[in-house]
Image (spheres, rainbow, N blue to C red):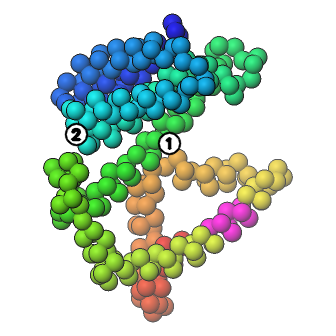
Amino acid sequence: MTFTMPIVAVLGAMFGFITGNIFGDPWIGLIGGAIVGAALAGVLAKITSVKRWKSIWGVAVLFGVVAAIFGGVGGLFGGFLVGLSMGWFATWVGTGQYRKRVPIYYTPGQVLWHSTFLFICAFVFFFLIAPLVPVIWLSFNAENFFTFTPEMLSFKAEGYSLKHYRDFLGTDEWMVPLKNSLIIAPIATIISVSLGTLAAIGLSQSHVPGRQAMMAILISPMIVPLIISATGMFFFYAPLGNWLQVNLGLNQAFVGYVKVIL
């Protein structure tokens, strides 16, 4: 318990800080979350692995009900997810599940680093995916602008609509670019995969001169922010497209395909 309580308290403090920000008092939320996390770890300390999931769902339901009292339907969902996360984490640590897939000869420091690494990966994945959730939610907004209305936050039917999807599917302004994307994407994929495979085969040979330099050049787009790469490619390929149109008389749409593929 002496190990589980502070660890779960840290997670509770994180959730509490976020919740406190919503209600305008983050530091009270942080302290309260830490206390709740430590208390939860103490309560679940005696839970066996057999009853683990029953305990997790029980914590999730309890958190959901309490949050619903203060935040309505939105609080119910948020509290349920927080309770599910904290219940799982508390029992995962308390029942020793964190050592289950770790070699038995690992030292405590190695176990800590292994678990920390997994959580870092999980958080990175979460922060990459999480921004998509509100965008999907906002796509059902009944208003003309992408904003959370009181009706949406209260989960009222009048706050939701399929108007944005009707606008998307019913106008050429959106369908023509969609058609172009469906045409360009497979062509660009085939060309890029073919060239990438050939480059990988060639660069895997140790006798290729300048292999390290070429590999660094090919990998460099991965470490440069996408907006910078896109801006550079735009200014590089725009004159090329103009030259193809003016001097060779090529169709503008075809030139666009060439520039996108390149």
At x 75%, y 19%, the residue is 104
x, y percent for residue 209: 77, 54
Position above or below: 259 against 115:
below
What are the residue bounds of the magenta stretch? 192-199
At x 26%, y 42%, the residue is 74
Tag 2: Cα neighbours inside 10 Å, few (<14), some, or many (≥20)?
Answer: some
Residue 259 visible, this angle: no
Residue most extreme to the right? 207
Query: What amino acid does circle 1 point to?
Result: Phe
x, y percent for residue 156: 20, 54
Residues marked 1 and 2 touching at CB (< 8 Å): no
Q: What element carries label 2?
A: helix
Residue 98's tag is none
At x 58%, y 76%, the residue is 187
Q: Is mark 1 on a helix, strand or loop?
A: helix
Which residue was labeled with disc 1?
A: 125
Query: What amino acid does circle 2 point to?
Result: Gly
Residue most extreme to the bottom? 249
Q: In which quarter of the image is residue 202?
A: bottom right
Q: In which quarter of the image is residue 69?
A: top left
Position above or below: 2 against 175:
above
Horizontal side of 97 relative to 154 (left or right) equals right
At x 46%, y 64%, the residue is 233
x, y percent for residue 13: 35, 21
Horizontal side of 89 relative to 67 (left or right) equals right
Q: Nearer the viewer, residue 213 or 143?
A: 143
Q: Nearer the viewer, residue 179 or 191?
A: 179
Q: Is residue 193 magenta?
A: yes
Q: Is residue 201 magenta?
A: no
Q: Secondary structure of the magenta portion, mostly?
A: helix
Q: Nearer the viewer, residue 186 or 18?
A: 18
Which residue was labeled with disc 2?
A: 72
